[in-house]
């Protein structure tokens, strides 16, 4: 009976063009795919929209980049909520406010969480809240580690927090959430907020600058090139 079922499976698979079967996991996610938007160095994103697929948004992996949020804080209680996020429980990053303080967290494949917090709460009024990442070390793709870098938080171009990240996410962020501005509906990046986490004050826009040169894995690039021959 089992042999008959196996034979039937192969017969039907041949009929419906199932072969060849590609059983790769993560490697398949790295294959080039058509994009709904052209690559660019600078993305201006606004709140009140649906989550943005990673393929249509900024790629900050293994490159120097910045995230800037243009906000207006009312002062009617401490500012709270998401500014910008990408990813979920299995990896990602977020720029947000909690109890009036500016925060950034990088979830390294759910194993480590690199967390920065401003030394003081942000005062009421109009501000530019900014995160900058400067690459200071090459990625080690073979060991599953992305580029090391210097992480910094700024309020109106004044440095308010910094730390060195020994490594970052190497290839892709979590599959459980896309890119969101002003809200966090999807799976949380860590134990830092509850779902929704809408920004409490006025968020006008978020600008992500990814003009820094991206560091790629030569083996992946070669395989992708061969796949397109």
Image (cartoon, grey):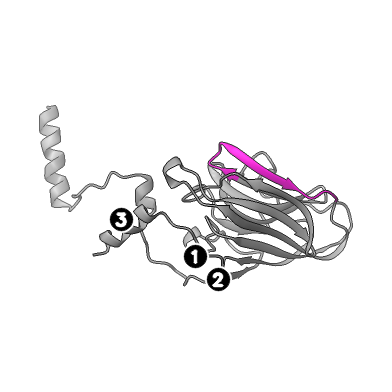
What's drawn in magenta, residue-wise? Answer: 107-120
Image height check: is 98 above or below 68? above
Q: Nearer the viewer, mark 2 or mark 1?
A: 2
Give the alpha-carbon distance from disc 1 to disc 3, as whole Å. Answer: 23 Å
Secondary structure at badge 1 equals helix
Q: Quadrant of the C terminus?
A: bottom left
- The label shown at residue 155 is none
Q: Which residue is mark 1?
A: 56
Comparing 170 with 135, the one in front is: 135
- Residue at 71% in and 54% down: 152
Judging by the rendered image, the residue that carries numbered circle 3 is 223
Q: Which residue is mark 2?
A: 41
Q: How many numbered marks, from 0 up?
A: 3
In this picture, residue 181 sits left or right of residue 5? right
Q: Quarter-wise, where is residue 135 in the image? A: bottom right
Q: Quadrant of the N terminus?
A: top left
Q: CA distance from mark 2 to mark 1?
A: 13 Å
Q: Which residue is rendered at x = 73% and y = 50% of the image?
A: 162
The image shows residue 133 at horizontal and vertical percentages of 63, 57
Residue 84 visible: yes
Which comes before the other along the chain, label 2 or label 3? 2
Q: Are marks 1 and 3 in contact (CB under 8 Å)?
A: no
Q: Which comes sooner in the sequence, label 2 or label 1?
A: 2
* Residue 108 included in the magenta stretch of the image: yes
Q: Residue furthest top?
A: 1
């Amino acid at each position: 009976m089992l042999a008959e079922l196996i034979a039937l499976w192969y017969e039907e698979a041949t009929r419906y063009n199932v072969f060849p079967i590609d059983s790769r996991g993560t490697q398949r996610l790295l294959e080039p795919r058509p994009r709904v938007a052209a690559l660019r160095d600078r993305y201006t994103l606004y709140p009140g929209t649906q989550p943005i697929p990673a393929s249509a948004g900024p790629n900050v992996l293994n490159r120097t980049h910045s995230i800037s949020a243009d906000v207006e804080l009312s002062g009617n209680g401490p500012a709270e909520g998401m500014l910008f996020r990408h990813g979920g429980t299995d990896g990602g990053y977020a720029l947000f406010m909690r109890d009036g303080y500016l925060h950034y967290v990088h979830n390294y494949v759910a194993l480590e969480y690199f967390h920065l917090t401003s030394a003081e709460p942000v005062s009421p009024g109009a501000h530019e809240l900014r995160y900058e990442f400067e690459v200071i070390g090459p990625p080690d793709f073979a060991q599953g580690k992305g580029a090391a870098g210097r992480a910094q938080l700024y309020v109106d171009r004044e440095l308010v927090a910094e730390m060195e990240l020994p490594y970052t996410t190497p290839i892709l962020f979590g599959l459980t959430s896309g890119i969101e501005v002003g809200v966090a509906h999807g799976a949380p990046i860590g134990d830092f907020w509850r779902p929704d986490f809408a920004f409490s004050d006025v968020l006008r826009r978020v600008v992500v600058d990814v003009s820094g040169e991206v560091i790629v894995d030569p083996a992946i690039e070669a395989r992708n090139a061969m796949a397109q021959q």
